[in-house]
Amino acid sequence: MGKVVSSASTSLDGFVAGPNDEIGPLFDWYEAGDVPWTSAGGDMTFHLTQRDADFWAEWTRRLGALVVGRHLFDITDGWKGTHPMGVPVVVLTHEPPDGWSYPGGTVEFVTGGVHEAVARAQELAGDADVGIAAGEIASQCLVEGLLDEVAVDLVPCFLGVGRPYFTEAAGQVVLGNPTTVVEGERVTHLVYPVQR
């Protein structure tokens, strides 16, 4: 079984999006180079620097499934049934959407709480890692002792206000020293172990 890792592009003041879900400069590093990376569905291509591309390739190689909340699912329209990374997605929600409009995709809905969502994602991932979306889901996983690592793509900007990587519910947590530090273009990739 792989690790359970939260991951997000984050501003220096800890936000993963603005108050209206705008990303501002948080994803500028996806277009900072000339190394193409094409999504699993083939509908989008990023242009990374070599350093960022190497980091991204390792992350996506290890990834076997994702757990996201209903809010992210809704604002992305469920990635039209196929996540850009090409892995199954488990959506934690109180109520699955009526008339899911992209049948045959790789999205499942779980209503039994964060433990059930992570367990299902681990089943789907097998020996690969499970990625956890930032925000409420990552916070719940941290509180419940489900996270092994916290990955941050730290972008040199301040948003001032918005959606935090971890909510107040996560409380005060001290992580271990970083196991990964990669200086990219307009981003620093950091991975911290969660101490238990």
Image (cartoon, rainbow, N blue to C red):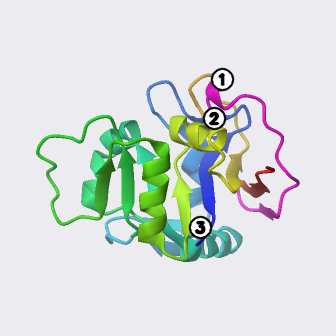
The earlier-in-sequence mark between 2 and 3 is 3
The residue lying at 57 percent from left, 38 percent from top is: 140
* Cβ atoms under marks 2 and 1 closer than 8 Å: no
Which mark lies nearer to you, 2 or 1? 2
Which mark lies nearer to you, 1 or 3? 1
In the rendered image, residue 58, in percent from the top left (x then y), is placed at 63, 75
Does residue 76 show up magenta in the picture? no
* Kind of residue at disc 1: Gly
The residue lying at 34 percent from left, 39 percent from top is: 93
Instruction: Report the side of 84 relative to 151 (left or right).
Output: left
Residue 73 visible in the snapshot = yes
The residue lying at 31 percent from left, 66 percent from top is: 43
Q: Is 72 situated above or below 79?
A: above
* Kind of residue at disc 2: Phe
Mark 3 Cα within 10 Å, few/some/many (few <14, many 20+)? many
The one nearer the camera, 102 or 147, is 147
Q: Quadrant of residue 59?
A: bottom right
Which mark lies nearer to you, 2 or 3? 2
Q: Is 74 situated above or below 80?
A: above
In the rendered image, residue 133, in percent from the top left (x then y), is placed at 52, 48
User: What kind of element bears circle 1?
Assistant: loop
Q: Which residue is mark 2?
A: 166
Range drawn in magenta: 165-186
Q: Which residue is mark 1?
A: 160
Q: Which mark is residue 48?
A: 3
